[in-house]
Image: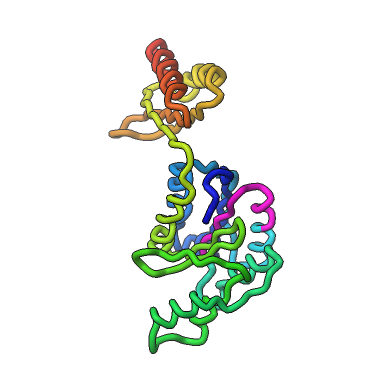
Amino acid sequence: MIAAVTTRTAALLIVGDEILNGEVEDRNSGLLTRGLWSAGVEIERALWLRDRPETITRAVSEARAAADLVFVCGGIGPTHDDCTRAAVAAALGVPLERHPEAEARLRHAYGGRLAAADLEMADLPRGARLLVGPRSGGFGFQVESVVVLPGVPEFLADILDPIWAELRGPARYRRELISACGEGRLAPLLREVQGRFPDVSIGSYPTLLDGRFRVRLVLRSIDPVRLQAATQALEAGLAALG
């Protein structure tokens, strides 16, 4: 069970040459960031990594020191460039071992099509707990604070659904305002409101809405009362700007 009380921060490691060379679009970081925010977990860092064992091992070790949970996505398949399982084992200082439940699931899923390389996906770091998608049957695993997930977004999303329930912490609240002012005019107001409400996160995001330049102002907090007060302060300031 992932501890919901003490786990408050996370690091994301997205593995794959195909992400960094543009062959495949990264959808997994968005799934993770949205889910973790909703579950009350703050993201400390997010990195995109090549399929290099030493790079992944070093990144996992550094991330474990910086965050309560480390999510690693990609590189757990059966081909030559799938080196995440071994790299995570090295970071944790444990060997790879054949996981009986993972092997059984692979044999059931592949049947007579099972190749020797497919079975290598059941070689997991010692002490691994399987994380199984309830709809797809695809699996990742967790060892200590490290959660390792497949790179296929559909499998990843399926596996994450029960994890969010385990992580569920305090409710998070969000408000959004739209301004026609440029960020330069908004900057003093945002600085003043942020100073009064340090417990409310305030972000400004330029965008085009219906062909017009606008700035989205997004406020986030775990305290709905403080969020409402900060929103009202910002609304009053926007009205004064005209």
Foreground of the two, 81 or 186: 81
Farthest residue, direction left: 210
Quarter residue 109 falls in:
bottom left
Task: Reply above or below: 30 against 180.
Answer: below
Q: Indicate the quadrant containing the C terminus: top left, top right, bottom left or bottom right.
A: top left
x 38%, y 29%: residue: 176
Foreground of the two, 104 or 117: 104
Apparent side of residue 21 relative to residue 35 in the rendered image (left or right): right
Where residue 102 sits in the image (x, y, percent)?
A: 49, 75
x 46%, y 31%: residue: 220
x 55%, y 59%: residue: 147
Where residue 234 sits in the image (x, y, percent)?
A: 43, 18
Quarter residue 225 falls in:
top left
Task: Reply above or below: 112 against 13.
Answer: below
Range shown magenta: 61-74
**Is residue 107 covered in magenta?**
no
